[in-house]
């Protein structure tokens, strides 16, 4: 058995506090840290602060290896190539990707720096587990430096169809970078198939949907949908403090009102604007009244320095104002909007309090909000309205699936969700809860690590 694991990700699993360092929240961290603590290993990543790279140190039994990024590299590698080129391109080019040579060169340089740090951390017999779109060149770079170790790569976002990837001037370099791994893992079968087609077209590769060969490299492809810490969410949802908060929220919002909830990063891929227009249509066309149903949207700040994101915030807040102006009354506001993050206990209280959860991304690798909502429903009630373009739709088949580009269709499904017979509501929720419980984030991590070892 492999003794150690070296995780390579854009960010370290820590954040600074006044007293030093603390473990960051998040599914990836909670899933992977126990493996590293049990078997030993390192985590290579950026602290999130420009020019901040302390010497390697140990925190909670794991060696932390910070990678330095200058402010110009943050602008070009992270905000530029990663989030203004790759992010929109891989999300079906929902926004037009920008292709700039002066972004590409820092992307290469930063990927090499991550690979060098990983190479220093790896010992013979170790395995390296590289994560996500910011580091797609690292597998091949690390392969050149450390041919003695097993290398896995997991892509957390979608991999696009070959017709969309074809726009990328550096498509060949990206594919060659990923083919440096022994195992490349995707959230869905579609992502895996898209990657295979791209390698066959642009690298002249051969193989099946599970194995590819290009040049001297033979790579295994797997689909491994990421999940959540089921027990963590289920136990928090059952806690007395969350129960008390749910009761208080219900009093604040109206005991008899149905509540439709949206919780998203404020990102143009999430379809927040579409669902608000669908809710407006529900009030206009389906004769639902603001005094009977309200929409609660939590928008978590995201990449506020990027122009598309600030424009998205303006659009969403403008829609909220127009809907409230058109349908609101003195004591009944149709849309309650909260811009900011929620602490875990508050978030789970929101999940428990809602009658309908609306998750309508235009494209999403997985979308863990849908799974968090399901895990937070101990009474087997509540309805999940879910975009068919979220990876989670492949597993949560008992959700009410929608095409998020169809405003009228989303409005119709929202109406159905609000009036679903209780027996059908419970049956659907029980099936989804079984699925998420059986396939939690720890099972995902084990499956990925075992695949890399083989």
Image: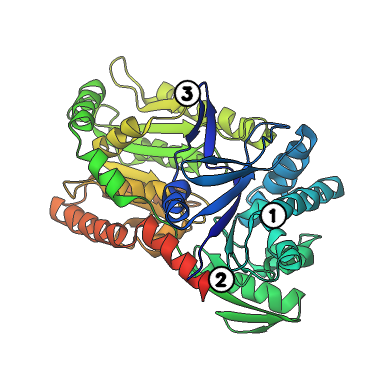
Q: Of all residues shown, which one is farthest toward the right?
A: 101
Labels 1, 3: front one: 1
Q: Which type of secondary structure does the marked residue at label 3 adopt? A: helix
Measure how far apart labels 1 and 3 are at the Cα level. 54 Å
Labels 3, 2: front one: 2
Image coordinates of residue 159 in percent, x first then y, are 60, 62
Residue at the location (71% across, 31% down)? 50
- Badge 2 local density, few (<14 within 10 Å), some, or many (20+)? many
Residue 415 in sight in this render: no
Residue at the location (62% across, 62% down)? 123
Residue 442, quarter of picture = bottom left
Residue where numbered disc 1 is placed? 120
Circle nearer the N terminus (3, 2): 2
Looking at the picture, does residue 7 appear above or below residue 202? above
Q: Which type of secondary structure does the marked residue at label 2 adopt? A: helix
Residue where numbered disc 3 is placed? 321
Looking at the picture, does residue 417 appear above or below residue 276? below
Q: Are marks 1 and 2 in contact (CB under 8 Å)?
A: no
Looking at the picture, does residue 128 appear above or below residue 57? below
Measure how far apart labels 3 and 2 are at the Cα level. 42 Å
Colouring convention used in this rendered image of the protein: rainbow
Image coordinates of residue 121 in percent, x first then y, are 64, 54
Residue at the location (20% across, 22% down)? 251
Q: How many marks are shown on the rendered structure? A: 3
Residue where numbered disc 2 is placed? 192
Between 38 and 403, the one nearer to me in the picture: 38
- Badge 1 local density, few (<14 within 10 Å), some, or many (20+)? few
Residue 26, quarter of picture = top left
């Amino acid at each position: 058995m492999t003794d150690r694991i070296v995780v390579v990700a854009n960010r370290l699993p820590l954040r600074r506090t006044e007293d030093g360092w603390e473990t960051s929240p998040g599914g990836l961290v909670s899933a992977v840290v126990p493996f590293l603590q049990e078997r030993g290993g390192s985590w290579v990543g950026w602290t999130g602060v420009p020019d901040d790279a302390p010497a390697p140190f140990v925190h909670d039994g794991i060696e932390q290896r910070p990678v330095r990024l200058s402010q110009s590299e943050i602008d070009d590698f992270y905000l530029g190539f990663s989030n203004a080129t790759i992010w929109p391109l891989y999300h079906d080019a929902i926004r037009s990707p920008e292709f700039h040579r002066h972004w590409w060169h820092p992307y290469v340089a930063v990927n090499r720096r991550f690979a060098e740090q990983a190479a220093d951390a790896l010992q013979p017999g170790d395995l390296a587990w590289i994560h996500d779109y910011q580091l797609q060149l690292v597998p091949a770079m690390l392969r050149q430096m450390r041919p003695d170790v097993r290398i896995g790569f997991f892509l957390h976002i979608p991999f696009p169809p070959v017709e969309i990837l074809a726009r990328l001037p550096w498509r060949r370099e990206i594919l060659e970078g990923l083919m440096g791994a022994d195992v490349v893992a995707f959230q869905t079968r579609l992502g895996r198939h898209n990657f295979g087609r791209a390698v066959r077209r642009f690298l002249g590769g051969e193989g099946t949907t599970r194995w590819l060969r290009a040049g001297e490299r033979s790579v295994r492809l797997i689909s491994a949908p990421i999940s959540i810490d089921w027990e963590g969410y289920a136990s928090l949802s059952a806690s007395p403090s969350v129960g008390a908060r749910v009761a208080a929220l219900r009093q604040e919002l109206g005991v008899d009102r149905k509540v439709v909830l949206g919780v998203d990063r404020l990102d143009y891929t999430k379809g927040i604007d579409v669902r608000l227009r669908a809710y407006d249509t529900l009030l206009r066309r389906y004769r639902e009244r603001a005094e009977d149903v309200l929409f609660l949207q939590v928008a978590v700040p995201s990449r506020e320095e990027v122009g598309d994101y600030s424009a998205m915030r303006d659009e969403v807040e403008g829609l909220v104002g127009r809907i409230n102006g058109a349908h609101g009354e003195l004591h009944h506001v149709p849309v309650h909007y909260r811009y900011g993050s929620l602490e875990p206990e508050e978030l789970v209280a929101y999940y428990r309090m809602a009658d309908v959860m609306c998750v309508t991304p235009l494209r999403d690798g997985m979308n863990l909000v849908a799974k968090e909502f399901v895990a937070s429903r101990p009474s087997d009630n509540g309805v999940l309205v879910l975009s068919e373009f979220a990876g989670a739709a492949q597993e949560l088949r008992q959700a009410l699936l929608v095409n998020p580009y169809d405003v009228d269709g989303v409005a119709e499904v929202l109406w159905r969700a609000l009036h679903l017979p209780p027996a059908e509501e419970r049956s659907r929720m029980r099936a989804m809860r079984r699925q998420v419980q059986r396939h939690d984030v720890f099972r995902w991590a084990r499956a990925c690590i075992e695949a890399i070892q083989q």
